[in-house]
């Protein structure tokens, strides 16, 4: 009888010990999850020398939730930067993109905002938007595709690992309304239209893979509207004053649109008002 009593007491104490051990483990895990949610967030702006990108960096530097901002461009900046902004140079070759992505992955914190702002419409007198088929030049098409399509795709490739975390992250790529196939009513601008249409397809395709491998990331193809920057300056003559936007206005609109965005499992194609554009 005594042996039976001692056995029951032993079992009770053993169960209590095991339960306490599991409770401690659960508490540790929850603390880790809370710590992840409270970890300092990072932001990344690629193509940081462009007009809108510069205003994004400026506005992000005033967001107390963003502890570190990485700005990436081909050339170093001569601008005095806020303390939390780190400017990195990248020649946009795949080797350099991979190395930069690896560097970013090793930095503390998790990314909550990523912007890929690279874009080309013209370059001096050598690359101009085509008005007719006879204007098509293979060198120009390859140059425009490299900037507007291939470079963003390489960033999508090399960021999927560094962006995977418990932190919700929006990855915005600068597209254009003229990249919409169903919305093309005017024709012309062959290289630019095709490069943005191709970018849209790649963003939508990549979003399916990101939904499996980096569920915390929402991809957005963004049309900023006609903005008063070097990209659109030669073509602003017929743009109404109220349709030509200052870069800071577009940056503010974009940050507002993605403020509380959560992953939905596929890419979004949005304009500066947050309205969906048909693919």
Image (spheres, rainbow, N blue to C red):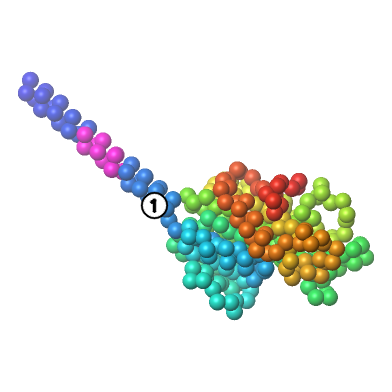
Q: Please tell me which residue is depicted at 62% across the width and 68% down the height of the picture.
A: 54
Which residue lies most toward the top here?
Answer: 1
Mark 1 neighbour density, 10 Å: few (under 14) some (14–19) many (20 or more):
few
Image location (x, y in percent) of residue 10: 15, 31
**Residue occupying the far bottom of the picture:** 78
Q: Which residues are magenta?
A: 16-25
> Which residue is labeled 1 in the image?
35
- Is 83 on the left or on the right of 57, as rendered? left
Residue, far front: 242
Query: Is 17 left, or right, of 44 in this rendering?
Result: left
Q: Is residue 276 left or right of residue 97?
A: right
Classify residue 127 by image quadrant.
Answer: bottom right
Q: Is residue 14 left or right of residue 272?
A: left
Give residue 198's quadrant in the image. bottom right
Kindly tell me whether residue 213 is visible in this rendering.
no
Q: Residue at x 64, y 56 (%)?
A: 254
Q: Is residue 259 visible?
A: yes
Coordinates of residue 155 in the picture (x, y in percent): 62, 61
Compared with 2, 59 (above or below) is below
**Residue at 33% from the left image edge and 42% from the top image edge:** 26
Q: Quadrant of residue 240?
A: bottom right
Residue 23 magenta-drawn?
yes
Tell me which secondary structure the magenta stretch mostly adopts.
helix
**Residue 160 screen position, x and y as percent:** 56, 55
Magenta run includes residue 201: no
Q: Position of residue 23 (x, y in %)?
A: 29, 39
Secondary structure found at label 1: helix
Quadrant where the N terminus lies? top left
- Counting every numbered tag in the picture gives 1
Please, is residue 183 above or below residue 103 in the view? above
């Amino acid at each position: 009888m005594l042996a039976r009593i001692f056995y029951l007491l032993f079992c009770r104490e053993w169960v209590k010990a095991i339960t306490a051990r599991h409770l401690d483990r659960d508490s540790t895990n929850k603390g880790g999850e809370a710590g992840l949610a409270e970890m300092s967030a990072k932001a990344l702006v690629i193509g940081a020398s462009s007009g809108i990108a510069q205003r994004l960096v400026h506005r992000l530097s005033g967001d107390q939730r963003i502890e570190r901002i990485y700005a990436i461009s081909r050339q170093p900046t001569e601008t005095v930067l806020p303390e939390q902004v780190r400017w990195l140079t990248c020649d946009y070759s795949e080797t350099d993109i991979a190395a930069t992505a690896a560097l970013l992955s090793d930095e503390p914190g998790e990314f909550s905002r990523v912007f890929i702002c690279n874009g080309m419409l013209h370059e001096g007198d050598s690359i101009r938007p085509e008005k007719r088929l006879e204007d098509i030049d293979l060198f120009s098409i390859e140059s425009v595709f490299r900037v507007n399509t291939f470079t963003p795709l390489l960033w999508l490739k090399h960021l999927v690992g560094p962006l995977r975390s418990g932190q919700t992250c929006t990855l915005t790529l600068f597209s254009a309304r003229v990249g919409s196939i169903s919305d093309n009513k005017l024709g012309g601008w062959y290289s630019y239209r095709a490069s943005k249409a191709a970018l849209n397809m790649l963003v939508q395709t990549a979003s399916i893979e990101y939904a499996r491998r980096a569920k915390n990331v929402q991809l957005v193809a963004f049309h900023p509207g006609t903005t008063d920057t070097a990209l659109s300056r030669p073509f602003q003559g017929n743009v109404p004053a109220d349709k030509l936007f200052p870069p800071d206005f577009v940056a503010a609109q974009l940050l507002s649109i993605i403020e509380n965005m959560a992953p939905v499992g596929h890419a979004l194609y949005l304009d500066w008002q947050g309205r969906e554009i048909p693919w």
